[in-house]
């Protein structure tokens, strides 16, 4: 995962370093894979996704949403008996 400030700061979307594909702007339901928690649903958020391999670029604001989602998920798991 690579941190960028916002999609607007990238005049032309970067080429994917993994596959040479093109990043396209998305604004839709996003889930991320957390090492500890597994799949965490972030909700609707703006991000860039490679049209080749699916690699994501997250703008700064989206990182905030991801942090919130991870916090929420962690609290839910701590609160609920296994
Ligand atoms: Zn790619």
Image (cartoon, grey):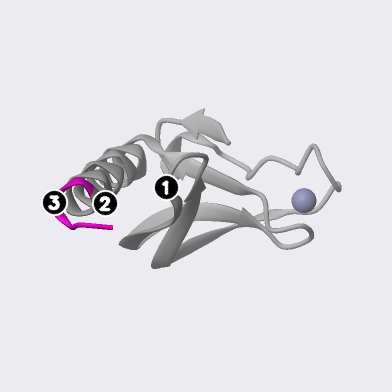
Q: Give the residue furthest to the left.
A: 79
Q: Nearer the viewer, residue 15 or 67?
A: 67
Return the disc, 1 or 3, that comes first in the chain's sequence. 1
The Cα–Cα distance between marks 1 and 2, rounded to whole angstroms, is: 8 Å
Q: Quadrant of the C terminus?
A: bottom left
The Cα–Cα distance between marks 2 and 3, rounded to whole angstroms, is: 10 Å
Query: What residue sits right under mark 3 in the picture?
Result: 79
Image x and y of residue 60, in percent: 35, 34
Look at the numbered disc 3 and say if its residue's Cβ is closer than 8 Å to ligand 1.
Answer: no
Image x and y of residue 33, in percent: 52, 50
Q: Are circles 1 and 3 on residues that touch, CB within 8 Å?
A: no
Q: Quadrant of the N terminus?
A: top right
Q: Nearer the viewer, residue 78 or 65?
A: 78
Question: Quadrant of the rendered structure where residue 53 is?
Answer: bottom right
Query: What residue sits right under mark 1 in the picture?
Result: 37
Secondary structure state at the residue bearing disc 2: helix
Task: Say which residue appears at 85% left-offset and 46% top-offset.
Answer: 20
Image x and y of residue 56, in percent: 59, 49
Query: What residue sits right under mark 2 in the picture?
Result: 73
Secondary structure state at the residue bearing disc 3: helix
Q: With respect to residue 76, does 71 lie above or below?
A: above
Image: magenta residue range: 78-82
Q: Are circles 1 and 2 on residues that touch, CB within 8 Å?
A: yes
The Cα–Cα distance between marks 1 and 3, rounded to whole angstroms, is: 14 Å
Return the disc, 2 or 3, that comes first in the chain's sequence. 2
Callout 1 environment at 10 Å: few (<14), some (14 to 19), or many (20+)? few
Q: With respect to residue 24, does 70 lie above or below?
A: above
Look at the numbered disc 2 and say if its residue's Cβ is closer than 8 Å to ligand 1.
Answer: no
In the drawing, does residue 53 fall left or right of residue 8? right
In the drawing, does residue 66 fall left or right of residue 48? left
Task: Say which residue appears at 20% left-offset and 57% top-offset.
Answer: 81
- The question of residue 72 being in magenta is answered with no
């Amino acid at each position: 995962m690579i941190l960028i400030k916002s999609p607007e700061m990238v005049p032309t979307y970067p080429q994917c370093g993994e596959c040479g594909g093109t990043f396209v702007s998305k604004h839709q339901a996003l889930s991320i894979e957390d090492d500890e928690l597994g799949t965490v649903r972030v909700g609707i958020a703006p991000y860039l996704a490679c049209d080749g391999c699916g690699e994501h670029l997250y703008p700064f604001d989206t990182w905030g949403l991801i942090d919130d989602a991870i916090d929420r998920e962690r609290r839910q798991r701590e609160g609920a008996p296994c």
